[in-house]
């Protein structure tokens, strides 16, 4: 079965995985970036999360509400630590970021989760209608997206 999953996975998925690994390694090092750049990857991951939610369960459903609740919980859980190791220089528009492996862990959790979800729904499409499956999955994905969005949101109000 594993061979079939890998062989039926579109090649662009492996390109996305490679890109996420590259960005995760880059995030592990201290760096200086523009304020705008801090928002790009979290917003892309947020949009991909919304797309997955929409395609798998629907936005205007209890699963959509669970995703939003998870998003808020993820931001709240990471809010305090999101400001650590971040220095915003308003005059230059630059942000000094301390290296961390947390972005890699979040990106891999989202990627692996989305991959597993896609495989599960492809092999058992009836699960998308089961709240016992949809609600916990969407809550977790929302929380991961929220954790990823905490730093940009904290910088936006700084």
Image (spheres, grey):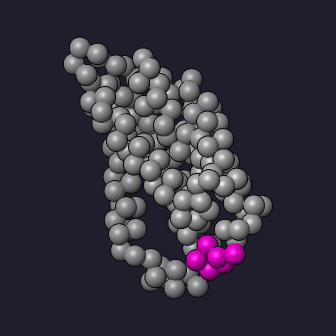
Residue 137 percent coordinates (x, y): 66, 56
Q: Is residue 140 visible?
A: no
Q: Is residue 122 magenta?
A: yes
Q: Residue at (44%, 83%) from the top-left corner?
A: 7
The quadrant the C terminus occupies is top left
Q: Quadrant of residue 21?
A: bottom left
Q: Which quadrant would residue 91 be assigned to in this image? A: top left
Query: What range of the chain is rendered magenta?
Result: 121-126
Query: Residue visible at 42% across and 31% down?
Result: 152
Q: Is residue 81 above or below residue 130?
A: above
The image quarter containing residue 113 is bottom right
| Whether residue 97 is situated above or below residue 126 in the rendered picture | above
Residue 140 colored magenta? no
Looking at the rendered image, the quarter that the N terminus falls into is bottom right
Magenta: main secondary structure: helix
Q: Which residue sits furthest top?
A: 91
| Residue lying at 36% horizontally and 19% vertically, measured from the top left | 87
| Residue 95 in view, yes or no | yes
Front residue of this view, candidates 97 and 41:
41
């Amino acid at each position: 079965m594993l061979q079939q999953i890998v062989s039926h996975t579109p090649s662009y998925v492996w390109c996305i995985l490679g890109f996420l690994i590259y960005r995760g390694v880059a995030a592990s090092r201290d760096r200086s970036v523009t304020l705008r750049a801090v928002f790009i990857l979290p917003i892309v991951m947020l949009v991909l999360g919304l797309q997955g939610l929409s395609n798998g369960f629907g936005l205007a459903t209890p699963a959509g509400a669970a995703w939003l609740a998870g998003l808020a919980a993820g931001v709240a859980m990471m809010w305090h630590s999101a400001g650590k190791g971040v220095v915003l220089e308003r005059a230059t528009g630059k942000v000094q970021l301390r290296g961390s492996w947390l972005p890699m862990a979040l990106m891999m959790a989202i990627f692996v989760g989305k991959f597993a979800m896609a495989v599960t729904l492809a092999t058992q499409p009836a699960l998308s209608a089961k709240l016992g499956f949809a609600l916990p999955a969407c809550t977790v994905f929302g929380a991961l997206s929220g954790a990823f969005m905490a730093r940009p949101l904290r910088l936006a109000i700084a």
